[in-house]
Image: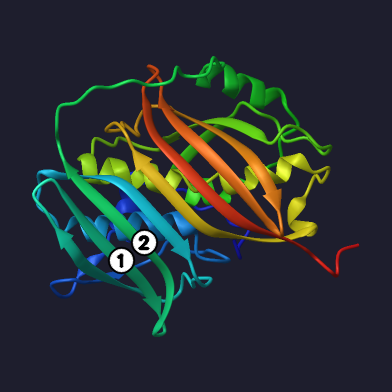
Amino acid sequence: MGSKEIIRHTFPEVLDIITPKRVGDYWFIGDSLRPQFRLFGGQVVAQCLLAAYETVDDHLTAHSMHCYFLRAGNADLPIELEVDPIRNGRSFCTRRVVARQNGEAIFNTSISYHVEEEGMSHSLSMPEVISPEEAAALNAQRDNNIPRNMLDLFGVTRERITERLPEAQEPVAQSWFKVIGPFDGCVRKQQAALAMISDFSLYSTAFSAFPYEQPEKVFIGASLDHAIWFHEVPDMSDWILYDTYSPWSGGARGYNRGSLWSRDGKLIASTAQEGLMRIRRDRK
């Protein structure tokens, strides 16, 4: 962020600002929260999901998103969102969304929607972790100077379970997240909140494998892609556990995977992301 001033929003206020405005059958204009040093990818993911939802029938629910970050965005410029109704089917439909600024694509995603159907089910068990309240007490005792500007700006609160150490550690991380303020939004808004939060801690997991307290001084980093599979309807006003790990890094890229769990143990979404990890030539 370009300013040291901490701006705090509730999540309903965030949605009021970032929800795209429809200007044509398949054209939308999105605004951004400010100030941002570089446009937060999670914001654009949520905006594209909300725009695409406006072009599908009410009985359809998003079950997956596959996204690519193409260029750095500018929070001071409007975002043009073009929705392509690439497929309409009886059980599934697909939307492709391209986000542009100054006539150049900065982001694109494919979103698949599905009607509600009965079927067999299974799920892994939620990891055993401390509660959000215990995590908050633990963080209060830590020497924790991690900046919260982006979390406050986007109306999100976070309690870390895993502490980031200056030495190399297992590339795993766990945190509790929830949105700030009363929020009882519909499925579309709940999924938009989850999509945005899913971009907060996933990409950085790979850096934990290396002994750097401030990886941004060692690496040039950026999100390259992002995938979400929605399993259950979330309630983002309650605590959500984000459990992430990095199976691999190499070739100036780091690969990360994540699971988001409701407080009562339901697996509500899965994520995957690859990010740039290019070593700075000018590092000291």
Is 117 placed above or below 54 here?
above
Q: Residue at x 31, y 31 (%)?
A: 235
Q: Quadrant of the C terminus?
A: bottom right
* Amino acid of disc 2: Thr
> Can you see residue 114?
yes
- Mark number displayed over residue 259: none
Image location of residue 1, percent across then percent down: 59, 61
Say how the picture is coloured. rainbow
Q: Residue at x 66, y 28 (%)?
A: 162
Q: Residue at x 58, y 44 (%)?
A: 256
Mark 1 vs 2: CB contact within 8 A: yes
Image location of residue 188, percent across then percent down: 23, 46
Give the CA separation, mark 1 to mark 2: 5 Å
Q: Please name the residue that numbered disc 2 is placed on.
A: 109
- Mark number displayed over residue 97: 1
Is 13 placed above or below 246 here?
below
Element type where label 1 sits in the image: strand
Question: Which residue is more in the foreground, 134 or 94?
Answer: 94
Is 201 placed above or below 276 here?
above
Image location of residue 72, percent across then percent down: 53, 71
Image location of residue 282, percent across then percent down: 86, 70
Q: Residue at x 32, y 47 (%)?
A: 64
* Amino acid of disc 1: Val
Question: Which residue is more in the foreground, 88 or 157?
Answer: 88
Q: Quadrant of residue 82?
A: bottom left
Q: Is residue 50 left or right of residue 75?
A: left
Q: Quadrant of residue 172?
A: top right
> Can you see residue 55?
no
Residue positioned most to the front: 120
Element type where label 2 sits in the image: strand
- Mark 2 Cα within 10 Å, few/some/many (few <14, many 20+)? many
Is 227 placed above or below 258 here?
below
